[in-house]
Amino acid sequence: MLESIDIDQLSESQLRELVAQMQDALGERDEAIRQYRLRNEHLTHEIAILRRHRFGKRSESKSSSPQQNLLDDLVDEDIAAIETELEKLAEYESPKKDRPLKPRRQPLPPQLPRSEIHHDPESTTCRCGCELTRIGEDISEKLDYEPGQFSVERHVRSKWACKACETVVQAPVAPHVIDKGIPTTNLLAQVLISKYADHLPLYRQEQIYARAGVELPRSTLADWVGRCGVELAPLVEQLRACLLGHAVLHADETPVPMLSPGKKKTHRAYIWAYATTRSAAIQGVVYDFQPSRSGKASRDFLADWQGKLVCDDYQGYKAGFAAGMTEVGCWAHARRKLFELAERGDSPIAAQALETIGTLYDIERDIAEKPPDERQRIRDARSRPIMEKLREWLIHQRSALTAGTRTARAIDYSLKRWDALTRYLDDGELPIDNNWVENQVRPWALGRKNWLFAGSLRSGQRAANVMSLIQSAKINGLDPQAYLRDVLERLPSTKYSAIDSLLPHNWSPAIKV
């Protein structure tokens, strides 16, 4: 601070250094303001396009097909997410009192069962020593949900006054992931789990909740999903950082149809999945939604990571290997090529190769629970001799085959990738195949049948973020509903430096679930 510096005591060189520091600080401030304004302009433009789609000509149509419902829900989620980001940007430019007030919400149905939660001051004794007198209370209601039944939490914040010093004491309002919203974190978790884990679109959830006695419009549900997606994003970014701290990762990708607002056709987007190995100390998976299968998506996600990547032979990973990553091949893919031939019954060579590869998998099952150094020692003693004989046998069989035949192509697939396929023998931390991450991709295959498409890049990435947390919770043995409920409860009051404690592999419940 300038107030703590006696300028008269500074030398000329110190003054120049101080001026330079001030100019740097001003430059950083101006650049931050410029970035905020650019981001604000971009988001304002994006939300204008979405609103024109949502409330323009398409809304005049009487069509209420499931496809149209899905797209409208996704657009509403995107609008809510953008509004949340704009609100966060506004915090840097104007105080809360200068912002426009939101419309008053409708009261919750009176017939719903209610439970009261009282929030009283920690002490009813004033600082002057007098006893406080209760003078009133503020009541807020939040909608809660257990499968098949809604209830209302009445939060009663009593007011206490000191007659001597004329002060009023009241317990503060607990921060909430949706400020002044009606849903409890339990209800928010229910909506997210239903949409992303149980693959129930919002228009179907609207019908289910109506049968339970509460009308929750899809636009309201979409608003909640969009806002939760923004709030949970930093958690997923932290999970990504944890994964990139590991020396070995799995990677895989799967197609997802994407439809941009205003267009009637879908194009193929992709979910890229990255996971630690089953034997890693930290268990986690992060999904990355991208509009294409370009290898740049993988390079951007992995950034400067230089570890060992277990993957299939997709060309999109090759640039990363050229930049310093180590390729680890997948025997499940190599075996699949041979299995397709053996299943036809017209390739004895494939059948015999499968039997040998099966022996390698038998060894892996035997050593699955052993520590890495022990796994590597046993692989050296048992698997490596089998692998060397298999290679010699494949080369011999290939020499007698005509190029281009199915059996020749299946053998070529393995021989051309032999170094990558046998790399797992040198390191007990490496798996024999990529099946672990392929299992983590399967929920997306189920979701595709119900979602039909992603409505935008933003909605696809939101789905990727929420599903990263849900799937990581599952593989850590957690109930994803309980996990999300607790995380949404604690997130508003958790400092960014402590956000690591909310990741699935570190989580322990702080509330009764």
Image (spheres, rainbow, N blue to C red):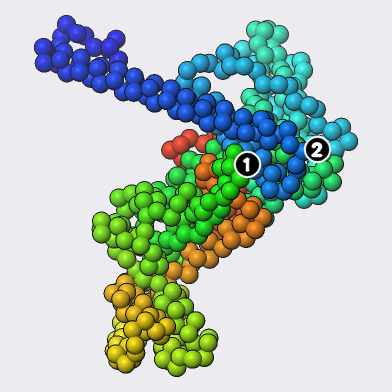
Residue, disc 2: 215
- For badge 2, the amino acid type reads Glu
Q: Residue 74 carries which label?
A: 1
Where on the picture, by quarter, is residue 34? top left
Placement of 446 over or under 258, stated as above or below: below
Q: In this view, does 167 lie to the left or right of 399?
A: right
Label 1 Cα neighbours within 10 Å, binned few <14 / some 14-19 / many ≥20 = many
Q: Which amino acid does label 1 sit on?
A: Leu
Is disc 2 surrounded by few (<14), some (14 to 19) or many (20+) residues within 10 Å?
some
Q: Which of marks 2 and 1 is in front?
A: 1
Residue 276 percent across, percent down from the top left: 43, 60
The label shown at residue 206 is: none
The quarter of the image holding the N terminus is top left
- Residue at the (36%, 77%) spot, across then down: 413
Q: Is residue 25 above or below residue 167?
A: below
Are dots 2 and 1 in contact, CB under 8 Å?
no
Residue 174 in view? no
Seen at 71% across and 21% down, the residue is 103
Position in image of residue 333 (x %, y %): 43, 74
